[in-house]
Image (spheres, rainbow, N blue to C red):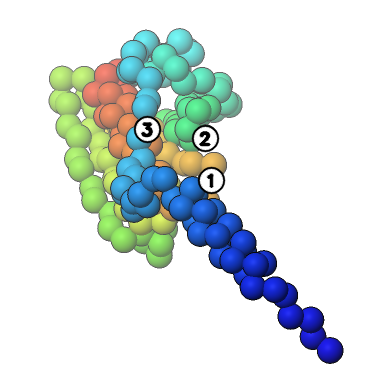
């Protein structure tokens, strides 16, 4: 059989419930404002490439240069988990083959890319001719470029992030590194070894 509590207990229960609700609601509940990603990157300071190569250009001081065989380089951005991989090939009457190969590597990303935007670069004074490709979407590489003097030297570069491709998330880092790629191409000089 159920036991019925005296009315006194009900009054205490309701009074305590009312007091708890009254005490706990001292601040009004407001919706949270939209949050925006705030990323701060180090100020850009450049230095000349210190590794002996048939080319020279300015690199960001905060990057790490990894010397690789065949005059190749890896410019790493440790804080961004990214690198620019530079491959060098001498031109030996095979310029069309090198250009075709470079463009094939760019357009391999067309499967995942939303858009591939080429920008040509020409500096006849320094004999630097090339193209920079911006690749939007969830592709493996978001910037690629190739540069040549059209007679002796050919460089290909690709930007890679060591994370799963998510273009929206890494777009600020891509924009940050794109300025370094432009600086690299603008300051590129060919030199004999």
Identify the element where label 2 is drawn: loop
Residue 173 image-quadrant placement = top left
Say which label, 3 or 2, has the lower sequence index. Answer: 3
Q: Taking 17 as reference, is 37 above or below it?
A: above
Residue 43 image-quadrant placement = top left
Residue 138 at x, y percent in the picture: 41, 56
Q: Residue at x 27, y 40 (%)?
A: 132
Q: Residues within 10 Å of mark 1 (few under 14, many from 20)?
A: few
Identify the element where label 1 is drawn: loop
Residues at circles 3 and 2 in contact by the CB criterion of under 8 Å = no
Q: Taking 49 as reference, is 174 above or below it?
A: below
Query: 53 or 92, which is in the foreground?
Result: 53
Name the mark nearer the viewer: 1 or 3.
Answer: 3
Query: 143 or 175, which is in the foreground?
Result: 175
* Residue 122 visible in the snapshot: yes
Residue at the disc numbered 3 = 39
Check residue 163 in the rendering and tell me which mark sits there, or answer none: 1
Identify the element where label 3 is drawn: loop
The span from disc 3 to disc 2 (Cα, nearest Å) is 15 Å
Residues at circles 1 and 2 in contact by the CB criterion of under 8 Å = yes
The count of marks equals: 3
Q: Residues within 10 Å of mark 3 (few under 14, many from 20)?
A: few
Split into 4 quadrants, where in the image is the C terminus?
top left
Residue at the disc numbered 2 = 81
């Amino acid at each position: 059989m159920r036991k019925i509590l005296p009315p006194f207990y009900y009054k205490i229960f309701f009074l305590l419930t009312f007091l708890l609700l009254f005490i706990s609601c001292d601040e009004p509940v407001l919706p949270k404002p939209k949050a925006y990603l705030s990323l701060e990157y180090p100020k850009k300071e450049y230095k000349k490439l210190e590794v002996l190569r048939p080319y020279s250009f300015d690199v960001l001081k905060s990057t790490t240069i990894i010397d690789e065989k065949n005059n190749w380089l890896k410019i790493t951005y440790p804080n961004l988990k990214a690198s620019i991989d530079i491959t060098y090939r001498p031109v030996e009457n095979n310029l069309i083959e090198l250009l075709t190969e470079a463009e094939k590597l760019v357009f391999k990303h067309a499967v995942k890319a939303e858009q591939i935007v080429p920008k040509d670069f020409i500096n006849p004074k320094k004999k630097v001719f090339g193209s920079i490709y911006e690749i939007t979407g969830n592709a493996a590489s978001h910037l690629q470029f190739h540069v040549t003097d059209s007679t002796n030297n050919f460089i290909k570069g690709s930007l890679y992030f060591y994370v799963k491709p998510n273009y929206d998330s890494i777009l600020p880092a891509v924009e940050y590194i794109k300025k370094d790629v432009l600086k690299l191409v603008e300051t590129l000089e060919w030199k004999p070894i």
